[in-house]
Image (tube, helix red, strand yellow):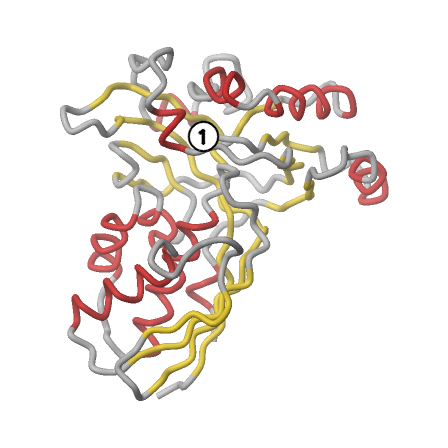
Amino acid sequence: MNKKIELYAPAKINLFLHITGQRTDGYHQLQSVFQLIDWYDMVSLEYVEADEITRPLGAHGVSLENDLVVRAARLLKKFTSYPHGVKIHLEKNIPMGAGLGGGSSDAASVLIGLNRLWDLNLNQSELMSLGLELGADVPFFLFGQNAFVEGIGEQLSHIDLPEEQFLVIFPGQSIATKEVFQAETLTRDHAPITISNFLASSWKDPPFGNDLQWVASKICPEVNRALDWIAQLAPSSVKRMTGSGSSVFAAIPKTCSAREIDRMLQKLPSGWVGRLVQGLKQNPAYNSV
């Protein structure tokens, strides 16, 4: 049995995000396409003989009880009645509260890694069911591929996306997902589409957008500032917020050189974080050793 495993936990962007309804339990029905990108947190799991879960290194300012990586480990341990423990080190690189799914990806990587480290042999479906108890985005990262997403985020269909590179900008301010979804001004009646509708068109076309963007920009004006910033430097690109914000992104032609992108990123306002990322086909956590 391996005593230690290290895993990449990738971020994602929403190529579009439509809110199609709201259930009686308060959860929102949505449709989206989730694209994995190569912006990573690093999760290190070390087997311990003792019946304990510790986290010597984690996200800054996040308590042990609220940390999704700890909650994921505890949930899996309880579900399987596993008698031993783990020491978790989490190196955060993906900004928190940015709409990039970092926390959900971290939790998924813990489930993937502990399933292997503890020799539990749970199948992907079982892991995804557990992941849904932690958050609506966690099943996607356990699904491991780019997906057309429906329901509250748990209905996933593999979708083959073209290889693109994206400029992703986090404008230094986080937004609470709950605040955006609870806004009275949020529209919740976007007409549903099918995968065929999406594949017959392009996510860059006007019918597609992010229904949360207008609400999020009222809560956090930095969202619009970030969109305007990209518009000035890449005027021909389609700009969009990802998730519930506050990060925004644009597809950048591969004809743009790395030097050009570096020059752009050097002009970022103080406190902002920007990165040129590549779209991924699969979640690398499944290939970690």
Image position of 180 (left or right of 204): left
**Residue 148 at x, y percent in the picture:** 36, 35
Residue drawn at the location 34% of the way across and 52% of the way down:
143
Q: How many marks?
A: 1
Q: Is residue 87 visible?
A: yes
The residue nearer to you, when weighing 261 against 134, is 134
Three-letter amino acid code at the position of disc 1:
Ser
The residue nearer to you, when weighing 7 against 212, is 212
Where residue 191 sits, quadrant-wise, is top left
Residue drawn at the location 71% of the way across and 39% of the way down:
271
Image position of 22 (left or right of 18): left
In what element is the residue under mark 1?
loop
Where residue 186 sits, quadrant-wise, is top left
Above or below, 3 relative to 184: below
Above or below, 169 relative to 240: below
**Residue 74 at x, y percent in the picture:** 26, 66
Where residue 162 sits, quadrant-wise, is top right
Residue drawn at the location 59% of the way across and 30% of the way down:
248
**Residue 30 at x, y percent in the picture:** 31, 27
Residue drawn at the location 23% of the way across and 70% of the way down:
77
Quarter of the image containing the N terminus?
A: bottom left
Question: On the image, numbered disc 1 is attached to which residue?
Answer: 244
